[in-house]
């Protein structure tokens, strides 16, 4: 559980630290405190959707950290026998990196209002992600064909569960991606999708990071 | 980026006034309607759980008298009762119900930031409740694994409901978590981003601090339940061995190998202990506002109350293993968790002192909400003290899994939060419906409930000391139980049935006051917080008419010296010579004629 605890401690420290800062140097009992409308006091100057995304990322981090904690604890049991990850995963990792890069480019294009780049960027990001997901399915099939069944060993089971969980998070992202791309293809202005593109970009980077941690852990154990 | 409060971007926010009955009351995106939907659903399942507890008590008080309560039924009732009360009633009611209703109103917003997601949250919650209740009607019935669902027994034959019940239970929990996450992201974002001008974090009423922190805890802790539910589901459905050890069941070697039931316990309680505070923190917040309003005094030590909430929130993640002292653990761990458990008692005790000091020399109005709030201080102190007993390893070992534990957690997270729920319903009902609840019936309900629950739970402490174990269908002939213990069990059962009867008075009051209640006016309790300053009561869609309120002070300006009224609403400017309070509805520049 230490693994999950560390992550949660970081998240809680951020939240509590921020809240605590709101409380310092205040005299809440005073009416019309001249401090009250100063920047930083109170509302954070970003779009609500970004706060929601960050909060969701905190939730997802908790989820993945707990799964990894479970992984590390279960690993210590006698019956654990590690599996050899298919080489294909390296290719998949490359695809996910490309997807992240594509989103990053789309994002700067969207801020600058360059519609053609936004279009290509979105499509490229979507295609790479789809290929990644298909690649993961192929990797599953290879494992199955190699006799690494879900019930064979907890190491296998964890492999399937963790990759599925990660894939499902990506699918959720693809839903937002799909709506954004549809809007762009239907002729929406580049700036009007800036927020959605930014959210996708942050989310994809996050999921890339999660994948790298997962992959490293799977490889090393 | 510049500082732009949402309040100042009001014109950006579109208001689609719902027109048809369906969009207004069913597929509604209005936080007030969603709050009521959440509350009614939660209270409904809560009543189911109450009936289940009555049946358990019948069996315990009068064993062998009721043939329809078999041992299997008994375990199924226990499980469903516990899970419903903790999750589907209390969590849903405090956050989905009170959170939804109060957050936008108390911060001066028109609605949640993501109304559509808010609506989805309710509907997914409703589905999770339906899935849960379906398990009463499937072959084998609901699971009887106890609300802790410990493997291996939760999925092995011998425990009732291992065919369908456990699957539905796990599925229902997963759905609940999805629903909660959608709601929770909304509550957090709304409190952070949609506060009216001047509403700094430190001017939030404590209700919202409690709800906010509980939501943060929920968002981070429910994933642990989700993880355990997913892995247990796989163990059950596909035959993996995450939790399932190699085991011989009914003379047969099963296919499982090497899994770790302790791993499940860690994950479960990593969620389970914060869950206690997910229920307690909103109760702490709400009760603070009730006490302050009805004692006409500012809350004692507002900042300390906030800091205590933060401290409790942080610490609640590092005490989980005090539920596992008897599972066998390294003694150093036991020591660590006993220490953290005792540390978390400090901020909790500070809150209790501050509540008492708030009452000190207050102008106490013994209204029904106030009675419930004061009773909460008693029951909570009581349950908290037994918690300190149980937090110590050596004391816990003999008491664990006895009725002492049942008494403890019922006082602390059953009775206490429920008293706050009642107090809060009596307090906010006038805003929600425009009418007062009947006061006499309220007082009858209060005394019946308070005295009755003491008659139920005080003797349970004693039974626990005798060593009567919990989760036993019948005690049979035992030497350690004196005759008096059996008599006590009967009296507990009778009290439980009487308490349940008193809740019917409450239900009657809720329904009949809708039509016959005295008209409430906008601010019957003469309270300061924003929800009482809306132009309409009950508030209309969009809450605030044309202009959003502007906040000039904290929520606790009661009995301010030199001011003619004994309260100053939050939207009244600093200069009290400006008579902003106009029938409790709006400030000078907030006038609307609609
Ligand atoms: C009049 C009201 C209530 C009565 C008479 C009652 C009675 C009982 C009884 C007899 C048990 C079984 C004890 C055992 O054999 O181990 C039980 C368990 C439990 N109750 Fe209640 N209860 C009431 C209200 C509540 C409330 C409001 C909560 C909400 C927190 C709650 C939470 C629980 C939990 C968590 C368990 C443990 C379930 C388990 O062992 O799996 N109860 N209750
Ligand atoms: Cu605990």
Image (cartoon, helix red, strand yellow):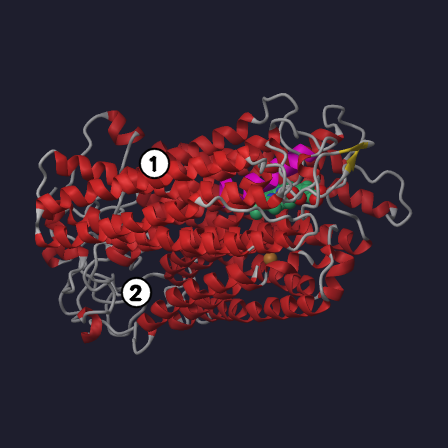
Q: Quadrant of the C terminus of chain A?
A: bottom right
* CA–CA distance in space, label 1 to label 2: 28 Å
The chain containing the residue under callout 2 comes to B
> Is A183 covered by the magenta stretch?
no
Along the viewing direction, whichever of B71 and B576 lies nearer the viewer: B71
What percent of the width, then of the height, locates residue B189? 30, 53
Label 2 near ligand 2 (CB < 8 Å): no
Residue visible at 47% across and 48% down in the picture: B421
Q: Secondary structure at mark 2?
A: helix
Q: Residue at x 9, y 45 (%)?
A: A115
User: Is B523 above or below relative to B160?
Assistant: below
Pointer 1 and pointer 2 on the same chain: yes
Q: Which mark is residue B201?
A: 2
Region of the chain picked out in magenta, as a range: B75-90
Instruction: Name the residue tied to disc 1.
Output: B120
Residue A152 makes an appearance in the image: yes
Do callouts 1 and 2 mark residues in contact (Cβ within 8 Å)? no
């Amino acid at each position: 559980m230490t693994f999950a605890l560390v992550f949660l401690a970081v998240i809680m420290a951020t939240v509590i630290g921020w809240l605590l800062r709101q409380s310092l140097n205040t005299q809440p009992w005073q009416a019309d405190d001249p401090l009250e409308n100063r920047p930083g006091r109170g509302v954070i100057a970003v779009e609500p959707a970004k706060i929601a995304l960050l909060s969701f990322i905190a939730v997802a981090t908790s989820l993945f950290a707990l799964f990894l904690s479970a992984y590390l604890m279960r690993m210590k049991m006698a019956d654990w026998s590690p599996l050899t990850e298919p080489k294909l995963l390296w290719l998949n990792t490359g695809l996910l990196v490309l997807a992240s890069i594509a989103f990053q480019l789309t994002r700067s294009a969207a801020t600058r209002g360059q519609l053609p780049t936004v279009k290509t960027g979105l499509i490229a990001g979507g295609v790479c992600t789809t290929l990644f997901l298909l690649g993961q399915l192929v990797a599953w099939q290879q494992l199955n064909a190699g006799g690494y069944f879900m019930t064979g060993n907890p190491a296998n089971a964890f492999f399937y569960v963790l990759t599925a969980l990660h894939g499902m998070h990506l699918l959720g992202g693809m839903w937002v991606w799909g709506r954004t791309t549809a809007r762009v293809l239907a002729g929406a202005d580049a700036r009007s999708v800036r927020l959605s593109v930014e959210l996708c970009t942050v989310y994809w980077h996050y999921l890339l990071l999660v994948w790298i941690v997962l992959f490293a852990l799977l490889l090393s154990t | 980026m510049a500082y732009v409060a949402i309040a100042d971007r009001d014109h950006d926010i579109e208001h689609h006034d719902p027109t048809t009955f369906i969009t207004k009351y069913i597929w509604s995106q209005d936080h007030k309607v969603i709050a009521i939907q959440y509350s009614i659903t939660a209270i409904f399942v809560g009543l189911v759980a109450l009936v289940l507890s009555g049946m358990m008590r019948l069996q315990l008080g009068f064993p062998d008298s009721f043939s329809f309560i078999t041992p299997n039924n008994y375990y199924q009732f226990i499980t469903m009762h516990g899970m419903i009360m903790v999750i589907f009633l209390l969590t849903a009611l405090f956050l989905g119900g009170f959170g939804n209703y109060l957050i936008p109103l108390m911060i001066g917003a028109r609605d949640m930031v993501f109304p559509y997601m808010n609506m989805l949250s309710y509907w997914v919650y409703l589905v999770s409740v339906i899935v849960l209740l379906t398990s009463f009607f499937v072959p084998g019935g609901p699971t009887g694994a106890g609300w802790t669902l410990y493997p291996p027994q939760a999925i092995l034959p011998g425990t009732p409901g291992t065919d369908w019940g456990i699957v539905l239970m796990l599925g229902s929990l997963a759905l609940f978590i999805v629903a909660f996450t959608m709601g929770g992201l909304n509550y957090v974002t709304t409190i952070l981003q949609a506060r009216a001008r001047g509403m700094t974090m430190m001017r939030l009423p404590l209700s919202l601090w409690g709800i906010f922190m509980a939501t943060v805890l929920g968002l981070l802790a429910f994933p642990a339940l989700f993880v355990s539910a997913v892995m247990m589901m796989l163990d059950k459905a596909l035959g993996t061995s995450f939790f399932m050890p190699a085991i011989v069941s009914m003379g047969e070697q099963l296919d499982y190998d090497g899994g770790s039931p302790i791993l499940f316990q860690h994950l479960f309680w990593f969620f389970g202990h914060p869950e206690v505070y997910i229920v307690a923190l909103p109760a702490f917040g709400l009760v603070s506002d009730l006490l302050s309003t009805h004692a006409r005094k500012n809350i004692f030590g507002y900042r300390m109350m906030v800091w205590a909430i933060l401290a409790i929130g942080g610490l609640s993640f590092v005490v989980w293993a005090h539920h596992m002292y008897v599972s066998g653990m390294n003694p150093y761990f036991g020591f660590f968790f006993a220490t953290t458990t005792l540390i978390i008692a400090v901020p909790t005790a500070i809150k209790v002192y501050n509540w008492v000091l708030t009452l000190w020399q207050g102008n106490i109005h013994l209204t029904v909400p106030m009675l419930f709030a004061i009773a909460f201080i008693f029951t909570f102190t009581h349950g908290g003290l037994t918690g300190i007993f149980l937090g110590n390893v050596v004391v816990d070992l003999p008491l664990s899994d006895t009725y002492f534990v049942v008494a403890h957690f019922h006082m602390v997270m059953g009775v206490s939060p429920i008293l706050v729920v009642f107090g809060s319903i009596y307090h906010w009902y006038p805003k929600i419906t425009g009418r007062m609840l009947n006061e006499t019936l309220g007082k009858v309900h209060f005394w019946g409930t308070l005295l009755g629950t003491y008659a139920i739970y005080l003797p349970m402490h004693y039974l626990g000391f005798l060593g009567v174990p919990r989760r036993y269908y019948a005690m049979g002939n035992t030497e350690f139980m004196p005759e008096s213990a059996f008599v006590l069990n009967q009296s507990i059962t009778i009290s439980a049935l009487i308490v349940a009867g008193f809740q019917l008075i409450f239900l009657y009051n809720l329904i009949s006051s809708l039509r016959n209640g005295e008209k409430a006016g906008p601010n019957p309790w003469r309270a300061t917080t924003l929800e009482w300053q809306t132009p309409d009561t009950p508030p209309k869609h969009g809450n605030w008419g044309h202009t959003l309120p502007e906040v000039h002070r904290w929520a606790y300006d009661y009995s301010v010296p030199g001011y003619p009224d004994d309260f100053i609403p939050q939207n009244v400017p600093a200069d009290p010579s400006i008579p902003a309070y106009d029938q409790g509805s709006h400030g000078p520049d907030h006038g609307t004629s609609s």
